[in-house]
Amino acid sequence: MGVIKTALEIALERTEKVKSDKSGIDLFEAKQRGKKTASAFLAGQANLDEEIKKTAQGQRESLKQGIFDVLISQIAMPSNKEDEKKLETAGKGLGAVINDKNFSIMFKKLMDFLAKYLQEAAQYDQAIRQQYAPKLRQKEEELSRRLGREVRIDPFQDPEFVAFYNQHMNALKNNYEGIIEQAKEESRRMFEAGNSEQ
């Protein structure tokens, strides 16, 4: 025959479950608040250090995890100077939640590397356009003859040019993609190591 529990024992068990669920909910909410805070930070509307300081000690790790998750997702290949500025902002935010002095050194190297990529991408863009220009002129002349009026073709409206362009630009991107992944992995390692020490 099974053990019969008193009403008091059953009530105490349920209360214990509610307490543990409550702390889990608090941690989940802290992580969600961290994600919102990171988004606001990227938009220039939040101060991460202040948010971390005003968060209860037991919830800081979850808050930082939420911030980290959003900011690390911003680490990607930039396609222009605006993307580069967003990346720089994400790096500053990551520095606030990663408890490792080597992070800023690593991130500066990454930014230097990506600035080099943007310069190379601009050079590739120009070289690809110049290389394809004679073929594009030939197509324009042929269309102009057929239609009886002058025709200008936007290179990105020409499927052949787009394929040629993407092939070369993707080859350049592939040379740099590995560096982005390494930086993200190193950032994750530093974040986990720094927050497990607290």
Image (tube, rainbow, N blue to C red):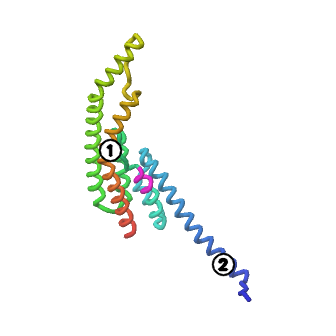
- The residue lying toward the viewer, choosing from 10 and 164, is 164
Question: In the rendered structure, does residue 110 fall within the stretch colored magenta?
Answer: no
Q: In the image, what residue type sits under mark 2? A: Leu
* Label at residue 12: 2
Q: Earlier in the sequence, mark 2 or mark 1?
A: 2
Q: Is residue 32 left or right of residue 125?
A: right
Farthest residue in the top direction? 148
Q: Is residue 54 visible?
A: no
Q: Residues within 10 Å of mark 1 (few under 14, many from 20)?
A: some
Q: Are marks 2 and 1 in contact (CB under 8 Å)?
A: no
Q: Residue at x 36, y 65 (%)?
A: 194
Task: Tell me if residue 165 comes above or below residue 111 in the rendering.
Answer: above
- The residue lying toward the viewer, choosing from 157 and 135, is 135
Q: Is residue 181 left or right of residue 10?
A: left
Q: Which residue is mark 1?
A: 173
Name the secondary structure under disc 2.
helix
Q: Residue at x 68, y 82 (%)?
A: 9
Task: Tell me if residue 144 comes above or below residue 39 in the rendering.
Answer: above
What span is colored magenta in the figure? 67-73
Q: In the image, what residue type sits under mark 1? A: Lys
